[in-house]
Image (spheres, grey):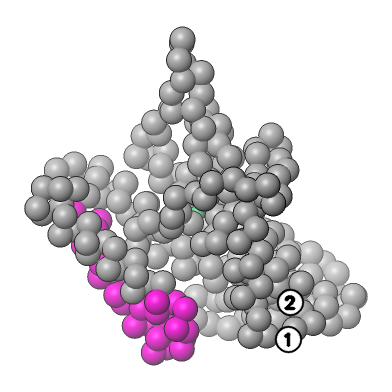
Amino acid sequence: MMLFQPPPPTQYDLRFSVAGIPVSVHPLFWLVALLLGSSGDILLLPVWVFVIFISILIHELGHAFAFRRYGQPSRIVLHFSGGLTIPEPVSWGSGWANVEPTPSQQIFISLAGPVSGFLFAGVIIAGVLLAGGSVATTWLFGLIPLPLTAIVPFGGRVVAVLVSMLLWVNVFWGLVNLVPVIPLDGGNVARNILIQVDPLDGMRKSLLLSVIAGGLMALIGLILLRSIFMALLFGLLAFQSYQYLQGRSGGRF
Ligand SMILES: [Zn+2]
């Protein structure tokens, strides 16, 4: 997810690297993760925070490895609104430059985030089944299977809750991220497809799609999923796309 600009680094950032990709975690990331999980069982709060951390990290690593495939180094920042994978300038002759990915490379890079979450969920499901456990699924709108609860034959309740949460977050939020709303991954995919199909008007079309899809998702979130959080998130993103659209027709974009 790329919702906001990265915050400036603080002395309380957690810093490490995964396979040569630098990761920094802003202190507000932990606070927001705690707040998001605070409606549930207080004893499971550390499990929830761990699940959010691992899931967002895996999503962003998908983007980072896809960037690397095209010769573009990047770094990952986890902060209050989720995660960011930021391309880093590379040495280019006597100076520094960003490698500008082509539209089809952009599509691959955007898809790599949600897909890495789906693959991670697939590995977990395979592990649970191999261990003799089972995973119950629910059907979202009767169309999309969502893994809901895992029964794991070892480790007791905490492991079962950990596995269930990991599956839910990786599959459900991966799907949410694929909705064609800018600046979610699905919005970036739609924009790059529409720009290729219609170089003159593709950008405007993708913003229009973003307004419509964002508005629909806000209604679905509110009415069908009863999630104020989703309604607010998509309402805000639809409004932001609407503002870009207005600015664009006025020639200010
Ligand atoms: Zn993403």
User: Where's residue 122, x and y in %?
Assistant: 67, 62
Residue extending furthest top?
94
Under circle 2, the secondary element is helix
Mark 2 vs ligand 1: CB below 8 Å: no
**Nearer-the-camera pick, 139 or 88:** 88
Describe residue 44's horizontal placement relative to residue 189 as left or right: right
| Residue beneath the point at 79% across and 64% down | 127
- Asked if one can make out residue 5 in the rendered structure from this viewpoint, the answer is yes
Between the C-alphas of marks 1 and 2, the distance is 7 Å
Q: Amino acid at mark 1?
A: Asp
Q: Which residue does the image show at 46% across and 68% down from the upper left?
A: 176
Q: Magenta span covers which residues?
A: 204-232
The residue pinned by badge 2 equals: 45
Q: Secondary structure at mark 1?
A: loop
Q: Is residue 204 above or below residue 49?
A: above
Q: Nearer the viewer, residue 195 or 92?
A: 92
Mark 1 sits on what residue? 41
Q: Is residue 165 left or right of residue 212?
A: right
Mark 2 residue crowding within 10 angstroms, few (<14) / some (14–19) / many (20+): some
Q: Is residue 172 magenta?
A: no
Residue appearing at x 55%, y 32% in the figure:
73
